[in-house]
Image: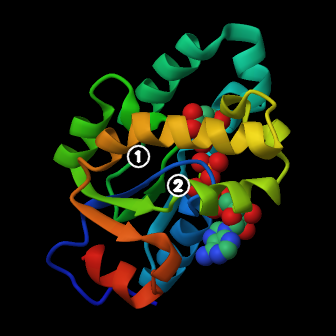
Amino acid sequence: MPDENNNTNTKAVFLIGFMGSGKTTWGRKLANQTGRAFIDLDETIVSETGVAITDYFAQHGECAFRELESRILKNLPLDRPTIVSTGGGAPCYFDNMAWMNKTGITIYFYLPAKALWDRLMQTDVSTRPALNGLSGEALLAFIETKLAERDPYYRQAGHVVNQLSLKLEELVKLAN
Ligand SMILES: Nc1ncnc2c1ncn2[C@@H]1O[C@H](COP(=O)(O)OP(=O)(O)OP(=O)(O)O)[C@@H](O)[C@H]1O
Ligand SMILES: O=C(O)C1=C[C@@H](O)[C@@H](O)[C@H](O)C1
Ligand SMILES: [Mg+2]
């Protein structure tokens, strides 16, 4: 379906938030709904490096990953209307958050730590190296600490939405 609002639809939309907040799932839905292109930053990193993110962390370390992530973010092909689902840590390194705010519309998917934990416990946590292989109560404590650390970066977004009550129509309006 073509985008209904032609005057602002050249701007990229960056979805940001903690791991498991639904950036990839909702990014795809938003792109389908608005007829825009969809890019998942994590998937782009995997296709450009040819290795899974867990393996990249293991082989090169987190610092190298953050530099690569920032470089790939700033070189995404954004010449047409695009929805970008970012990685959970991307807004918290270098000037990535300022760059996204300057380049497009930024939307933070807020979820409380407990809700993130419930979701992440249903997924394969081994594919998320930033979780350090934790599970159960230790994972919940880690998410609480990490979210508190990252929340000030995420809140620099132009829009903050409570992902638990988010409706697709609301997201479409914010993206215009
Ligand atoms: N509204 C929702 N209600 C319940 N579960 C959801 C919802 N949105 C996404 N999920 C589930 O939560 C998990 C994480 O979602 P998703 O992979 O989209 O998050 P993400 O923000 O892209 O995470 P990451 O930063 O790790 O890439 C998935 O298993 C997905 O099916
Ligand atoms: O929150 C994080 O630090 C990460 C989230 C994922 O999206 C990936 O970008 C990677 O696993 C790191
Ligand atoms: Mg994702």
Q: Residue at x 80, y 54 (%)?
A: 121
Left or right: where 140 falls relative to 173: right
Residue in view at x 82 percent, y 60 percent: 122
Labelled disc at residue 77: 1
User: Which type of secondary structure does the marked residue at label 1 adopt?
Assistant: loop
Q: Quadrant of residue 142?
A: top right
Disc 2 to disc 1, C-alpha distance = 9 Å
Indicate which disc residue 39 carries: 2
Count of numbered labels shown in the rendering = 2
Q: Residue at x 48, y 76 (%)?
A: 30
Asked if disc 2 and disc 1 are in contact, CB closer than 8 Å, the reply is yes
Q: Is residue 62 above or below residue 81?
A: above
Q: What's the coloring here?
A: rainbow
Question: Type of residue at label 1?
Answer: Pro
Residue 38 x %, y %: 51, 62
Residue 53 at x, y percent in the picture: 71, 30
- Percent from the top left, x then y, of residue 124? 85, 48
Residue 75 visible in the shown view: no
